[in-house]
Amino acid sequence: MPILVTGAAGFIGYHVSETLLARGEEVVGVDIVNDYYDVHLKEARLERLQKHNGFTFHRVDISDLETMKTVVAGAGDLRRVVHLAAQAGVRYSIENPFAYVQANLVGHMAILEICRNQPNFEHLVYASSSSVYGGNTKLPFSVDDRTDTPVSLYAATKKADELMSHCYGHLYGFPQTGLRFFTVYGPWGRPDMAMYIFCKAISEGRTIPVFNNGDMKRDFTYIDDIVAGVIASLDNPPVSIDGQAPCRLYNIGNHRSEPLMRMIGLIEEALGKKAMIDFQPMQPGDVKESFADIEAIRTDLGYEPTTPIDSGVPKFVDWFKSYEGV
């Protein structure tokens, strides 16, 4: 039985697809492959996936419901979906808000409609974000915390996705798990993320912008730990208890809030070059600190992150140097 993975050409989607294929699953990948960041990187990920016999790919916009119906009809008995396609990025949502409405709201709605119309459907796992915690000041962020103070449109669309999913779980009864990812990094990572931006600038001898004058912390989560959480969630669909919707939410983080400047120091060490830093004020829509309380997913699924930034950052830098020819 095939598993539909949306955003298969993306960073997390590529790694999840590769892991599913490695354990013998059939994966139907969907991605629009837009130019939000370097298309060559997305194509390189796809090239690696297409070497697997169990992988088929459709270059489709997930918000195009009729085309998505055609893709799913050709896939056969679809029972599980990993929905990772989205317009990403906090700062870009200020510049191009309608891209987020189309991809994250209309796109998520299309996936919900696809799932609820599959006769044997078992589980939808979808990507939310740590950004939903917005203006919260209590740390670490718990899935039980309120999330009604978003500070970016990106965060607002992800919170809306969670609400839409709960509604569909209540109305139609199919299991759903939303995953709030915390600052994902690792090989084949996105070039719009700070770690990639810093590596490229430092290696080229350019200045790096560091916001809030460097007074930032992030729960940096290595891609292998993210994938482990996604797969564990996929394999364990929630059940309805006392008539409640079979929907749950988990944080997937490293359960460590690391200073941004420490991450930069690890990059400098791995590259063998010092950074030229341009300290800047906080950017609109950004938050000072993120820190994941992972007790829920640890208790329910045995999730336990294994990669601290001391080993994860050098692994990313090694891949970066190979991919960029540094």
Image (spheres, rainbow, N blue to C red):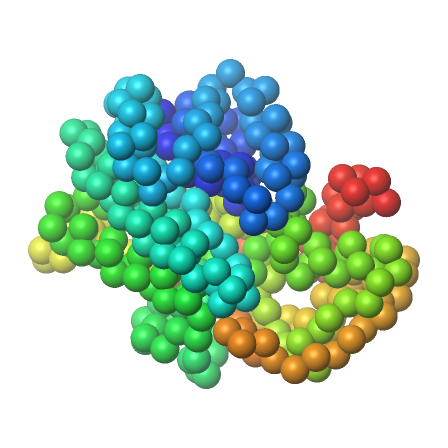
Question: Measured along the vertical axis of the image, is residue 69 above or below residue 275?
Answer: above
Q: Which residue is drawn at 41% across and 67% down?
A: 153
Based on the displayed image, in which of its 4 quarters is residue 65 positioned? top left
Residue 293 seen in the current view:
no
- In the rendered image, the quadrant that contains the N terminus is top left
Residue 286 seen in the current view:
yes
Count all numbered tags in the image, as a single digit: 0
Location of residue 159 in the rendering, given as x and y in whole percent from the top left corner: 34, 64
Location of residue 15 in the rendering, given as x and y in whole percent from the top left corner: 55, 39
Q: Residue at x 27, y 48 (%)?
A: 109
The residue sitting at the top extreme is 53
Question: Measured along the vertical axis of the image, is residue 19 above or below residue 205?
Answer: above
Based on the displayed image, in which of its 4 quarters is residue 80 positioned? top left
Location of residue 172 in the rendering, given as x and y in whole percent from the top left corner: 13, 45
Location of residue 104 in the rendering, given as x and y in whole percent from the top left corner: 37, 53
Q: Residue at x 63, y 77 (%)?
A: 216
- In the rendered image, the quadrant that contains the C terminus is top right
Q: Residue at x 78, y 54 (%)?
A: 200
The residue sitting at the left extreme is 243
| In this picture, residue 101 sits left or right of residue 115 | right
